[in-house]
Image (spheres, rainbow, N blue to C red):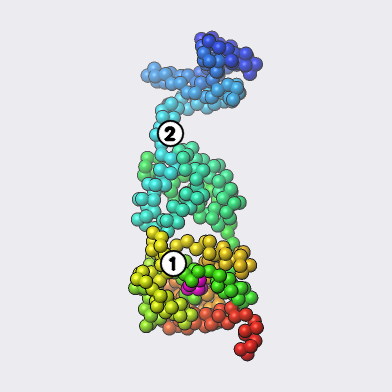
Amino acid sequence: MGAIPFTQAALAKLAGMQGARLVIKDPKTTGLRAELREGGTLAFYLFRRMPGGRPVRCHLGPFPDVTVDAAREKAAKLYAKMLEGQNPAQAKRARRGEATLKELFDYWLENHGKPHKKTWADDERQFNKYLTELHSRKLSAITKADVQAWHAKIGSKHGRYQANRTLALLRAIFNKADEIGFEGANPAAKVKPFKEQSRDRFLQADELPRFFEALKGETEVMRDFFMLALFTGARRSNVASMRWADVDMAAASWRIPETKQGKVQYVPLTQPAMAILRRRQEQATGSPYVLPSYGKTGHVVEVKGAWKRIKEAAGLEDIRPHDLRRTLGSYMAINGASLNIVGAALGHRQASTTQVYARLTNDVVADGMGKAVKAIEKAAKPKKARKAKQ
């Protein structure tokens, strides 16, 4: 072992020498050494004896990928940690045994997601679609800067709303990391979400005829799905999983056993909704679901393909399935229904209106929905048909 001043030029002369094994100390940096292997490779490492005489050797990287200046900076930082009693080698071994983000998510899903969230399947979908590049990372290797960069990338490619929803999921997952022994900080905790503008899109009067015309090109089950979504104002998942056992045809009422808020909701069924249900009941083949499917769930689940075709056929590129729910609420308000009645029809649960909902009868809500649906049907008719009727 010898000591020579570490310079790029001096070490470049050593690198590549075959058959020799040398260890060289850097006179300027305590503990910094360069090791030449028989094959000619040269690498930096830091050596120090810890209290009790235990030697610790930390690899800093190969030369020339790691420059002399970079090696000195790394060595100085590690040496300072050693003086504080930290053992980088132990920390490195601990990181090797540390959980990955995928392992943490699996733990979170089984112990927190599935037991407490109705939307756990959507969380799983988001994790597998938008967080793929972080799956195999050790928890301590995911930094705030990593999360910020990833959040910006998702926002650019998939929109701010999606980026914020997945950021919230990542934050929730890391909040439970201590349960599997991770002692680090939550890298998503202080990442600022994008500002979101409240969405107020609904189908306008001149768009409804195009929308209804585009529906004609779909299969019957897809047509009925979107029509029921529009005429009931219910959420997509509730419409898709509608069961005959929850439909009271005599009372023209649909009982949703559990909404997004975990509550039971009674939805008045307007005449167009009842017409669809009567037809489907006549065609029913024994499935417990109103909109059956051959998939695992037994009912309709995926509607993206059909929705894309409808949008393109109707020329409505900026419309989403959830906007059908907003369309019913908007036409209720346009036709004189109070915001409290609109909220009751859509199953909103704002604290400020909860007591008001309790006093609203189903007849009042049904009346408001009926007027709105009539207005929607009227607007959906082509202009020529409307003039002829007049």
Which residue is pictured at 43% across the width and 21% down the height?
56
129 left or right of 177 in image:
right
Q: Is residue 228 magenta?
A: yes
Q: CA distance from mark 1 to mark 2?
A: 45 Å
Secondary structure, mark 2, is: helix
Any magenta on residue 110? no
Say which quadrant the C terminus sits in. bottom right
Percent of width and height locating residue 76: 54, 24
Q: Which residue matches tag 1?
A: 240
Residue 49 image point, x, y percent: 43, 18
Mark nearer the viewer, 1 or 2: 1
Residue at the image point whose x is 50% and y is 47% from the top: 131
Disc 2 marks which amino acid? Answer: Arg
- Callout 1 amino acid: Ala
Question: Residue 207, labelled with which disc?
Answer: none
Where is residue 204 shown, x and y percent of the image? 61, 74
Horizontal side of 64 relative to 352 (left or right) equals right
Which quadrant of the structure image shows residue 281?
Answer: bottom left
Q: Earlier in the sequence, mark 1 or mark 2?
A: 2
Q: Which residue is labeled 2 in the image?
A: 95
Q: Is residue 205 above or below residue 303?
A: below
Q: Is residue 390 above or below residue 219?
A: below
The segment highlighted magenta reads 223-230
Asked whether the beta carbons under mark 1 and mark 2 sit within 8 Å of each other, the answer is: no
